[in-house]
Amino acid sequence: MRRRQILYVVLSVVIIITTLIFVINYKFNQTDKEVAIYNNQVELLFGKNFISHVMDDGQSMTFNIFGVQKVTDQGSLTMDLIASMELDNPQLEIVNYDLSLGETYEEYQFFNILTKIKIDSDDIEEANNLIINFKSNGKKTYDIGKIILKNNKGYTNGRIQPKGEYTVGYPDFSLDFKLISDQNVSITKVADLTGLFSHEFDEQIQITKDEPKHFDVSSFKVEKENFDFYTVTPILHYKVGKKEYLYNLPSVLYGIMGSEIELIKRIIDANE
């Protein structure tokens, strides 16, 4: 009986020691991965993302931030290594995030950070850098392009209503809509928050109540600034009499329709 008790004690001690060794090794391994990323032994490259979006007031919105990481034996970026993320604008708060890993091409692996952002301002707010805070080894700052956000205060949604097919594929844009107000309106321009995309109509489009209307934008005027991926809220500029109003349409995506291999190549080329 005594021998059996001693055996149980010995086995318990062995199990405890084995568990401690596993935990310590795991902790050191995680720390080594963080150090490798922090010292650029694991290279993270981000695409030039252009996000120009009008958000519902008081609500948050999730956006894609695309990048690639160099595959090495030093480890890779995982959710386990990240304590938090933030943008270089305190008015834009990252309230949640998730990292998904994709395909690998040559020595690079595609990743997407789904980033849920809330705006704490009534102004147009811009951020250019993503800051990743690691759990035990400082933080790193990455250029991700541009994020420009605005809440929808000042935008009117009670006169125009999308109807039927809503088609966007840069550089072509088309929209079916109708007027639900008793006041006739004139459409003058379509643009995003920044004016990077804009189109002014040579002749103002006149709309009367309940009359379905269709228009095509054959091309946007695009300022010469190259980005890889676009998330854009098209904004209709229209007039009632002589007073101008704004109406934000559903946001659209450009540049993400290819395969992950194509996206990897584009990000690598943009960082050369």
Image (cartoon, grey):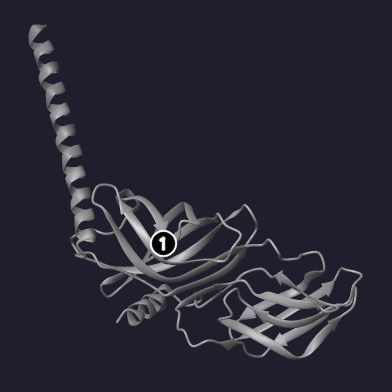
- State left or right for residue 60 relative to residue 114: right
Residue furthest to the bottom in view is: 202
Q: Nearer the viewer, residue 267 or 206?
A: 206
Q: Position of residue 39 (x, y in %)?
A: 19, 62
List the residue tagged with mark 1.
Answer: 88
- State left or right for residue 271 relative to residue 16: right
> Can you say which quadrant of the picture contains the C terminus?
bottom left
Q: Nearer the viewer, residue 46 or 188?
A: 188
- State left or right for residue 50 relative to residue 171: left
Query: Which quarter of the figure has residue 75?
Result: bottom left
Q: Position of residue 230 (x, y in %)?
A: 52, 75
Instruction: Determine the secondary structure under disc 1.
Output: loop
Q: Residue at x 71, y 83 (%)?
A: 189
Q: Position of residue 262 (x, y in %)?
A: 40, 79
Residue furthest to the top in view is: 1
Q: Residue at x 36, y 81 (%)?
A: 270
In the rendered view, would you say 200 is above or below 29?
below
Q: Residue at x 16, y 43 (%)?
A: 25
Amino acid type at image mark 1: Asp
Q: Nearer the viewer, residue 243 or 94?
A: 243
Q: Position of residue 49 (x, y in %)?
A: 45, 72
Q: Are there few (<14), some (14-19), or many (20+) residues within 10 Å of tag 1?
A: some
Q: How many marks?
A: 1
> Can you say which quadrant of the picture contains the N terminus?
top left
